[in-house]
Amino acid sequence: MSDAGWDSDWLIFSKRARNGAFVLLILFVLIAILPRIYRNYIQQSSLSPEIKEIAISETLPQENAGEKGEADGEREFKLPDQQFDPNKLTNEQWMEIGLTEKQANSIQNYLNTGAELEIKSDVLKLYAIDEDLYKKLYPYIDLPETKNTSIKNNEQNSVERISPDDDGSSNDDKEKSVKYPISVNTASFSELKSVPGIGKYYAEEIISLRKAYGGIIALDQLKDFYKMTPAKLDSLSNYLDVDPGEVNRKNINSLSREELALHPDITTDMAKSIIYLRENYGPFESVDQLLQSPYIDGELLDKLKPYISTE
């Protein structure tokens, strides 16, 4: 047998060998695509109609997630010491908050086009600011909540940060004419600051808390404040009155997804499911219908009820 002869023999496959190779190729393709078919079609067919669209959207690739957040879950943000106008921050100031240089540049490039942030929610237009960071920055953004809202009390909107150990008891600007108890939901910054044991720091914290929730329904909500002891909280009950009827309840039939997600107890996924249910099944007639959301159970609904309504 010549050298050419045995080389050509290796290039010849029998019919049986060719069939075997073809079967192996088919098995390889099936192994590669079956998990995806199961995940996208068979598994999702068992989901209820209310959450199928949510589940599908969550499986889609997040093309810009890495670039927008750049590991926001791992990044530590430093909140500013005072209110700021996002239209005027420099790149360095954005980076001090915790944004990357690339994110800060993207904000400046957007504003350099002539765009202007007029209200708080406009900050969400900034590509580098996601909803979680927006929630953290919300109390510090020196912009009105709506175009028709004006800042009526500059002192109330001040977020000067001082030590919570300074209760302001020696300040000359106390309102000595204040009659206690005062409403924790309607008292002005000055009135809150005059309460023994509160001062400037806790007054600002109370205002931030009631803005986030729409109001305060129990003094226990103050227990997570820095250095707020049970004894101090108990003493405040002599000066602060809580009326749940003063809570500004949010209408879940009219709020946008971004506005819903501003509530401390409503996550982005919850807000998304609420909007989906509302758009596909009509306005909510009762807040109990929120239990149709896969993200809301009875315990969470009980926490939300004092702050939401359907009208």
Image (cartoon, rainbow, N blue to C red):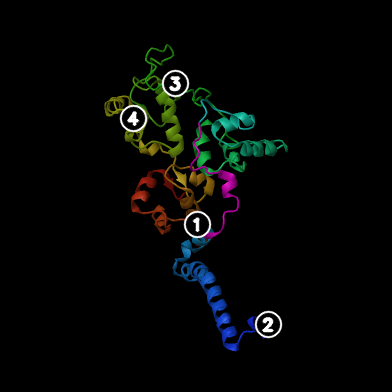
For marks 3 and 1 on the same chain, the one whose residue lies earlier in the sequence: 3
Going from N to C along the chain, the mark reached first, 1 or 4, is: 4
> Looking at the picture, which amino acid does disc 3 mark?
Ile
Q: CA–CA distance between discs 3 and 2?
A: 88 Å
Mark 3 secondary-structure assignment: loop
Q: Secondary structure at mark 1?
A: helix
Q: Earlier in the sequence, mark 3 or mark 2?
A: 2
Label 4, secondary structure: give it: strand
Label 2, label 4: how many angstroms apart (C-alpha)? 97 Å
Magenta residues, dominant SS class? loop
Task: List the residue tagged with mark 1.
Answer: 278
Q: In the displayed structure, does residue 69 sit left or right of residue 269?
A: right
- Mark 3 or 4: the one toward you: 3
Tag of residue 162: 3
How far apart marks 1 and 4 lie (CA) works out to 36 Å
Which numbered mark, 3 or 2, is in the foreground of this view? 2
| Residue hosting label 2 | 8
Q: Residue at x 56, y 73 (%)?
A: 29
Amino acid identity at mark 1: Arg
Q: Earlier in the sequence, mark 2 or mark 1?
A: 2
